[in-house]
Image (cartoon, rainbow, N blue to C red):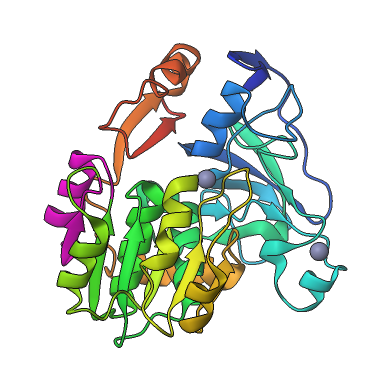
Amino acid sequence: MKYLVCEKPYKLLTRNKPIPEPRKGESLLKIKLAGICGTDIHAYEGTQPFFDYPRILGHELAAEYVSGSKAGMTAGDLVTVIPYFHCGNCIACRHGRTNCCANIQVFGVHIDGGFSEYIIVKDEYIVAGKGLSLEELVVVEPLAIAAHAIRRAQVSDQDTVLIMGVGPIGAGLIHFAKVAEAKKIIVMDTNKNRLQYAKDTLQVDDIINPTKEDVMVSLNTMTNGDMPTVVLDATGNHKVLEGAFSYMAHGGRYVLVGIQKSHLSFSHPEFHKREATLMSSRNATLQDFNFVIDCLQKGKINLQKYITHYLPFSAIESDFESLRNANTDVLKAVIDFAK
Ligand SMILES: [Zn+2]
Ligand SMILES: [Zn+2]
């Protein structure tokens, strides 16, 4: 079988090895589609901290079940994979918060992942596709990250939500803020194509381009002076992250979904007077995966224009490079293993 390995930064190679055999408690999956994530690009560029090479990347997977011991599965069933392998013993795991396990090993990040024709995974990380298509299953993981963040924020029909950044995660945040029936959704991005996508395809209530307008003035107008009760960051941009502390309503929540490397600083009195809540949101749990699959089954998510590029596996070594050129049309690119 063929697999794609990142030998070192800027060096991706297709190699061959025998198809592995599953042991007890494991199953063999045939990868059909694999999403390319910011994490994969950063690993390729060598900007992912604590990253070891060589590494097989890939953690957003739509696959076909081949063989193994997963109960209720037969060959040919379509599945996805929860790529956050947890220890089961740490304080977070003991409290059911497997997404932030103290010893987490993310498939395709800390250990070899899914850019491979076949993979072996422990049965507990295989999630049944329940009739979803491969195109839907391959985006369950990024959507689950968004669903988890909206659940963390406890968004309800009382909330005006500000979402910063309309990448694949930001788009997911919009979807699940809608599922949570947020009163109003405002989106901020510097990229006009992405703002247009948010407005036209995802039908958010308002858009803000901070390079063209004063964000505080626009938010004031859009919320009748109340300001957003929930702010979610999906940019991981230091300046954006610090600026947003003043966008929150009194009594508001601020959820950090994106991540960056440095310290954040903010005015304590400004934060305090709002009795604000600050939280991070990391990965997702089985509950989030099942929720996403349920929403997709019920047609609650409009995946139109979410996957923008399909790259054939046979040409991936060269095509991968093209994704890095700030191509503003790329929202989610997916590797097609059948081509
Ligand atoms: Zn990802
Ligand atoms: Zn753990």
**Closest to the observer: 261 or 77?**
261
**Closest to the observer: 215 or 229?**
215
Camera sees residue 152: no
Residue at x 57%, y 38% (from the top left corner): 30
Residue 303, given in percent of the width and then of the height, sits at 27, 54
Residue at x 28%, y 72% (from the top left corner): 178
Residue 3, given in percent of the width and then of the height, sits at 62, 23
- View extreme (bottom): residue: 158
**What count of labels does the image hold?**
0
Q: Say whether residue 62 is magenta.
A: no
Give the vertical position of 147 relative to 103 (above or below): below
- View extreme (right): residue: 89
In the picture, measured across the screen, residue 38 lies left or right of residue 170, that is: right
Q: Quadrant of residue 31?
A: top right
The quarter of the image holding the N terminus is: top right
Q: Say whether residue 195 is magenta.
A: yes
Residue at x 50%, y 79% (from the top left corner): 276
Q: Quadrant of residue 176?
A: bottom left
In the picture, measured across the screen, residue 210 lies left or right of residue 282, that is: left
Give the vertical position of 300 relative to 33 (above or below): below
Residue 336, given in percent of the width and then of the height, sits at 42, 30
Identify the magenta region.
189-210
In the picture, measured across the screen, residue 20 lies left or right of residue 338, that is: right
**Closest to the observer: 85 or 223?**
223
Q: Quadrant of residue 101?
A: bottom right
Residue at x 44%, y 71% (from the top left corner): 150
Camera sees residue 309: yes
**Closest to the observer: 277 or 320?**
277
Residue 312, given in percent of the width and then of the height, sits at 40, 22
The quarter of the image holding the C terminus is: top left
